[in-house]
Every structure is written in C-alpha cells, then in structure tokens.
Image (tube, grey):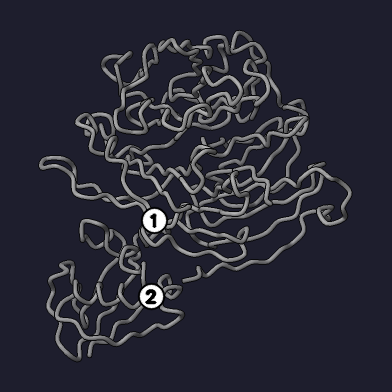
Amino acid sequence: MKSAVKRRTSAVARSTRSNGASAKPAVALLVGTQKGAWMYHSDASRTRWTVDGPHFLGHIINHVVLDPRDRTTLLAAAKTGHLGPTIFRSTDAGRTWKEAARPPVFGKFPEGWPAYSVDFSFHLAPGHPSEPGVWWAGTCPPGLFRSDDGGVTWVEVEGFNRHPMYPKWGALSPNSPWGSMVQWITIDPRESRHIYIVTSEGGVFETSDGCANWRPLNKNVEATFLPDPYPEFGQDTHCLQIHPQHPDRLYQQNHCGIYRLDRPSDEWVRIGRNMPKEIGDIGFGIVLHPRDPDTAWVFPMDGTEVWPRTALEGKPAVYRTRDGGANWERQDRGLPRDNAWYTVLRQAFVHDGRDPLGIYFGTTSGELWMSRNEGQSWTQIAAHLQRILSVTPATFA
Amino acid sequence: MIRVLIPSPLHSYTRGRAEIELEAGNLDALTHRLKAAFPGIRFRIIDERDRIRRHIQFFVNSEMARDLNHPLSPGDDVKIVCALSGG
C-alpha cells in the first residue's frame, strides 16, 4: 500500500542544488511535525533551501530518519489523531512510502504487568554500521523494538521490555504529558552490542551484551520531582549524546539539568551548574560538536513554577560550551530579541556534521533555524510550519 | 453480506473505496476480514490487545458497539467512525 502522500516542491529560495556549483554532497533536513513531514534541501553551501512536502499531511510525524549506511532508506514514525501508530518506509528518498508490514507492537506481558499497547513510536535509530538493515525504535508506553530488515518488520527487545524491573523502570506514571516512553537510543560506535537508551521516567539504561541485560546509569543525576532526589532510576533524561570520536564521553540534557559522563566512571557531573544562574540548565536537547568532545550546545527553557518550557523571558538563545561544560556563552545573534515564546523539543536540535558545522533547530511555533558558523549567528530557513517535533540531518545518495 | 462504511482516514488502505461488502459473524471477524483484504488497516483501529482504539467507534446500523464480540447479521451496516473528541 502506498501512503496517500502529496509531493510537491515549492521554492522558499532559489535552489542551487542542481547547478553543479559544489562537489560536496548536498544537505537535507527531515522535519517531522504535528501535521506532517517536510524535507528541506540545499547544496553544500547551505545558503539556499528548497522545500519538498508535505509528506503525510495531517499525520503526527514524530521522527523521520535517513539510513546513513545506504543513504536511501527513510523511516517515518507516524500516527494520526484518530488512527493507531505505524512506521512508513521509503526506499526512493521519499518519492513513495510503504507501511511497515509489522510495526512495533507489544506481545503478552506477564500476569500482573500493565497491559500496554503501543500508542506511538517516538524515536528511530539506525543500527551500528556493522549491522546493515538493523534499526531500533523507542515507543510510548516505553518499549524498545528492533528491525533486522530495514524497518519492514519489528520485534520486541525482550531483554528490556520483559526485564524483571521493567514495570518500575518504564512506567512510574503513564499519564505524564506525553506519556512515558523510550525517547532516545544511542549506540557505541565501537561496539554494536553496547547500547544506551533513555526512558522519560527511568533515566539512562545501558546494555553491554546486545540487549540481554540492562542496568540503570543514573548515579549523581538529580530528579527533583521525586521523594529521593538521587534515585537509582526514575530520572527524566530528555536527550543522550555519545561523542562519535571519543565514545567514552557522554552528555545528557535532563529534565533537571545538563550532565557529562566520562567512562569508565558511572557518576555523572552536573555541568549545567556552570550555566548563568538566571538562565539555569533546563532544556530538551543537546548537540555535540562531532570533532571536538569539549564543545556542545543547549537550548535552555523556562523550568520554573509550572514548568512553562518556553524560551526564557521570550528571548530564545542557544548556549555553547567549548570546555566540556566549565563555561557557557550565549549565542543569540539573529534570533528574535523579544516576545518569542517557543521552545525546541528534544529531537529538533541537530548538527549536519559538515565543516564548518551547521547547527539547526525547529521550534514549537513551526520555525526552522540554522547557523552555518557554529552558533555565532542564526538565520531562519522556514516559518509557519506546524509544531516541529523533530529535525534530522541527511545526506542522500 | 455486510456493508462496511470506511472513513476517509482509512481510504489509503482501501484504495479509495468508501464502502466494502463482506461476510462476518461479529465485529472481530469483520476487522480480521478487512485486514486480510487490506493489510495494516486493522492495527490502525484495533490495538494489539484487541481493544478498539480510543478515538475510533463502530456503529452497527445506528447502535454504537464497543465490544468486538458484537454480533452481525446479513444486511447490517457497519460504520467505522473517527470519533470527534474535541480539537
């Protein structure tokens, strides 16, 4: 079955993609929103963008991801306001889409466990480069799923979903605003069997044996909303990033702060304490510089009182550290100076890996922004989209 | 035969058909017949616990049915509704 995808291209600016001006590969941004997906394309200069879409108009698209191993296969995590969840797959760069033959579904749980059904797939992660065709998916309620055939069929990862501790790790309060979920999956680039996942009500979990066994990895991470503020698990880790060239270094943006971990230690350090006090260290996403393990960017939001989760005082800004979190600098040139109350969700803050590094974010108000000088200044690529749930960089074959 | 009225969000599965005719003794059998004819359609309206999804409703003739064991008889109309729920 082909999905009912409308495909049309309208220029937001004149494309330079086809003029052969640059030998470097073109850049694409895959944007998932509350009402569909769009793709933005540019040549390597990243100065002009064309838009392709909407794809899946009206669908809630949590994540759209290109397989970096074949640079052709796309997966999209979708549902609608009425219909249940599924995963769509394209093998022609988004020209046509086909639904997964078996999307993520829970099997039977042991007696006495919650009788969960998958509400939506949230996070999609291509497998390790040594495992072509392998994909991982995180769902709400919290579930970890694996595909071995490029996203056509999905099976549960029973090592996690049936772990004796799963009812406690995964679902302390399934009625949280988005619902408890597996919201990030990070694979050690050195070892396909070494995987980190995060749940929104459990924190970070780690397996070293390809998902058979799991353990919490939350030491020294604060959960101010729980009776014990430093529990073994129960934290809300929004985003977990492993450095690609120095995989012993990890960063997380947490519900309560920004942390760094240098393995083999298992004690996180709250580097967000070094953010300006009036800004704090609450946010959703964190971006790492792929060639410098000491450089990272965050997008702070208001976490006071009733957790507004807006740009602080309506003045959006990115903060950068260049020394592993000891110091932070504000980067807001080009962003609105006032009365901008959006925020940036956890899957909507990314980089493109190029040199100089391009950094991108999509806002809850439907704007797509970029910096082509590592955050020194920002320009708007698009506005008036729907609430942006994810932005994923892509380099098509 | 039973006439099934398909709402527009599911037309991508039925290749645009708004009405399907098939035979089934109850709603559960009807949804499985739909699945056999249009792979993927059942999971969008029935979850893996065989529960009708929260924003989906079935009407048998003019009666709302929340139980997949609801019996069906030849000549019945089954209307699948994407329920209005605000927003």
The chain containing the residue under callout 1 comes to A
As displayed, is residue B77 above or below residue A379?
below
Disc 1: CA contacts within 10 A as few (<14), some (14-19) or many (>=20): some
Q: Secondary structure beneath disc 1?
A: loop
Which of the 4 quarters of the picture holds residue A349?
top right
Task: State yes or no: discs 1 and 2 in contact (Cβ < 8 Å).
Answer: no
Which of the two marks, 1 or 2, is nearer to us in this view?
1
Q: In this view, does A306 lie above or below A361?
A: above
Q: Is A380 above or below relative to B32?
A: above
Left/right placement of residue B85 relative to residue B65 reads right
Could you tell me how many numbered marks the image carries? 2
In the image, B35 versus B12, the foreground residue is B35
Residue at 32%, 63% in the rendered image: B43
SS class, disc 2: loop
Which residue is more in the foreground, A114 or A107? A107
A395 lies left or right of B51: right
**Residue A310 picture location, percent across and down:** 54, 32
Q: Measured from the top left, where is residue A50 in percent x and y? A: 75, 55
Subunit bearing disc 2: B
Q: Residue shown at 52%/56% (left/top)?
A: A35
Q: Which residue is drawn at 76% across and 45% down?
A: A25
- Mark 2: give few (<14), some (14-19) or many (20+) Cα within 10 Å: some
For disc 2, the marked residue is B7
* Camera-nearest residue between B28 and A209: A209
Pick the residue in front: A86 or A82: A86
Residue A358 percent across, percent down from the top left: 72, 34
| A364 over A265 or under it: above or below | below
Q: Name the residue under label 1.
A: A153
